[in-house]
Image: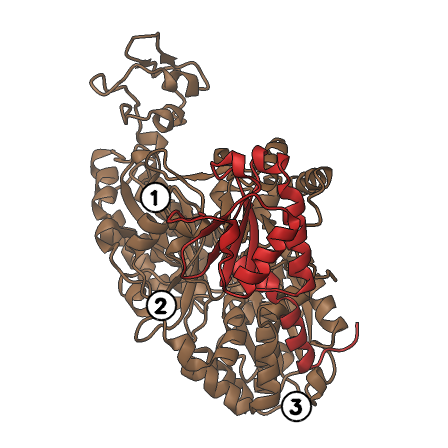
Amino acid sequence: MEQTTQAVRSHVMICAGTSCVELGSLAVRDALEKELRKHGLDKEVRVFTSGCNGFCTVGPIMIVYPEGVFYQRVDVDDVPELVEEHFLKGRVYERLLYTKPAGQEKVPMLNEIGFFSKQVLRALRNRGLIDPDNIEEYIARDGYSGLAKALTEMSPLGIIKEVKNSGLRGRGGGGFPTGMKWEFAARAEGDIKYVLCNADEGDPGAFMDRSILESDPHAVLEGMAIAGRALGASQGYIYVRAEYPLAIQRLHTAIDQAREVGLLGDNIFDTDYCFDIDLYYGAGAFVCGEETALIHSIEGKRGMPRPRPPFPAHKGLWGKPTVLNNVETYANVGQIILNGAAWYASLGTETSKGTKVFALTGDVNNNGLVEVPMGTTLRTIVFDIGGGIRKRRKFKAVQIGGPSGGCLPGDLLDTPVDYESVTRTGAIMGSGGLVVMDETNCMVDMARYFLEFTQDESCGKCTPCRVGTKVMLDVLDRICEGRGEEGDIALLEDLAETIRAGSLCGLGQTAPNPVLTTLRYFREEYEEHIREGRCRAHSCPALLKFRVIEDKCKKCGLCQRACPVDAVDWEKGQVAHIDLDKCIKCRSCYGACPFMAIE
Amino acid sequence: MAKLTIADLQKIKEKAERTRHLREGGMRAKVVVHMGTCGIASGARPVLQRLMELVEKENITDVALTTSGCAGLCSSEPMMTIEIAGEGPVKYVKLDPDKAEEVFRTHVLGGEVVTKYVLARGQEKAY
């Protein structure tokens, strides 16, 4: 383990989340270390890697402490100059600074970048500040102090009471009060009990859990160990997707280190408490995020839900009382125990306490991982943190809650994000996926996309879900292809109600939500598709005949360069023209035009 | 590594205090050694080196020691700016390692400005 006492004047954090690693951050780290050695600076500047910093759009990311200077899109080739400027000469290296979306203003300090300054970090409190592969760095940031307090100063019932009072609710999406869940399992009869962690994150565009596991794996282990004490369990399992290799690797390292120093295993902190954690890899079936299906999967059975009751708190894994919580939920537990329920509940709204992590993706300038207090409005997330819509386009909708959630229009942007407010809109809080869409997205097609996902992932147990979603999908396909009929909307609504009422688990019950919310807020788009054969977002290929609007065309030729089949006729200084015989309706020209001059 | 006790947690935390301050802020003072070409040429590096040794030897955890570019008065390098939290920055000129150590001990640790090496109390911020 690394020696942390040696006086160094500067620490350089290199983001090693999945996204930055993909973009080459590890090569940047190696180059940086080499360059620092070359200048004899390696003793005074320490380089470390951290988990996901959150601002994935601008990776690879590097932050230099103590100044807190934020460098973006760092390439190996930038390193020599950066070292010379920043570390040798002590000047901020301007070329790699973050630039505000509107204009050219450069922002050197991390805390002054809008993306970061509006966030409040609790579940992600260690991101960018610790090396996830070093347990000492976690401990130095109060890690395992919550567990120590829980084991030595609190009774199991006291732990449950504290979690209940904190108002923590399940971050996987359902929002069930965590303390109550623990209480049920604690009261259940049985000498063997289990603590499960759901890391089977499957929503398209969501990566909250992955980032937490990658940047702060010990926080999850600590939360699970505290839960184990509360219910009297001695074994925990993390059900993690096999598609998350980096998260799995860091979890393995974390578990090994925790075992080595006795924070997992027998007689933790010399008490009578024994607890260990193992990993179980999920094969990527969406339905296995449902608790009973997940339990079946660990048991080696086919991942299918079963009726509840009995609830897992009474009969869960191998028929034993079991608590299942999400990654983000556990990541909050250690701090709740250490700092107290009142501290945790000081943030948030009446019914939803604390913070929520969102994976902000889609047509916003700043994609990435954000954590905000409950009750923050969608507008703040999309515009202040997300930096608004790309390419100067207009906001159209935000999809919240993944395939179980819904699309909300602009006039609901002031909705505060808490469980109740979001549910009232017809969407759900969900696990934290936020997909922002601009005016070039068709809402019918969006609903179809999400329904296609749930249809594909339906386990097939309940007929309404298995067959109903298929019929709905066929109707949506027809509408998108311009073969919609009068009565289709009524049919969709009817089917949606049946599927909602007749499905066993959350997957089926919520599968129609994307369709229902788009019907509620964007009904006119469905009607235009059916009655006029028109897609206002110019998205459904069957309904498209592209043409250049001559008044708006600035004769720049970008459309011609974007066209893969030479269907755009353009010469310098001339208005472009699209040859419909050659056009394959790929939308490349439409996406490339900065002036919305193609329709 | 042996099994950790609760006392060990505290020890690890204390050991890493400097790291924590460095990354999270909360430093009591900031010491900036100006290291433009002029500063380096006139001996800013040994000054920085001495200060780093001092910080390590005295186990000082709440002072940020950092570098910046030319302070604009190249003829008076090596220079150093000391900014105690809540006070204005003070610039020192024509330093060498011994003078720098004296300034560090008297000003940063002792709270007394070392007038004989001072350029002027400035209003500008180091950052």
Q: Colour of chain A?
A: brown
Q: Label 2 amino acid?
A: Ala
* Cα distance in 3D space between marks 3 and 2: 37 Å
Task: Please tell me which of labels 3 and 2 falls first in the chain.
Answer: 3
Query: Where does label 1 land, which residue?
Result: A437
- In the displayed structure, A337 sits above or below A540; it is below
Marks 1 and 3 on same chain = yes
Which kind of residue does numbered mark 3 sit on? Asp
Q: Amino acid at mark 1?
A: Met
Residue closest to the eye, A251 or A285: A251
Q: Secondary structure at mark 1?
A: strand
Q: Residue furthest front?
A: B116
B40 or A257: nearer the viewer: B40
Kindly tell me whether residue A538 is visible in this rendering: yes
- Residue B108 badge: none
A256 lies left or right of A532: right
N-terminal of the two: label 1 or label 2? 1
Callout 2 crowding tier (Cα within 10 Å): few <14, some 14–19, many ≥20:
some
Q: Are marks 1 and 2 on the same chain?
A: yes
- Name the residue at 64% across, 64% down: A137
Q: Nearer the viewer, residue B28 or A310?
A: B28
Would you name the residue on which mark 2 appears? A501
Is residue A200 among what the camera can see? no
Q: Quadrant of the N terminus of chain A?
A: bottom right
Subunit bearing disc 1: A
- Palette colour of chain B: red
How are the residues colored?
Answer: by chain
Point out residue A355 in the picture as x, y percentages from the top left corner: 41, 66
In this view, A280 is above or below A108: below
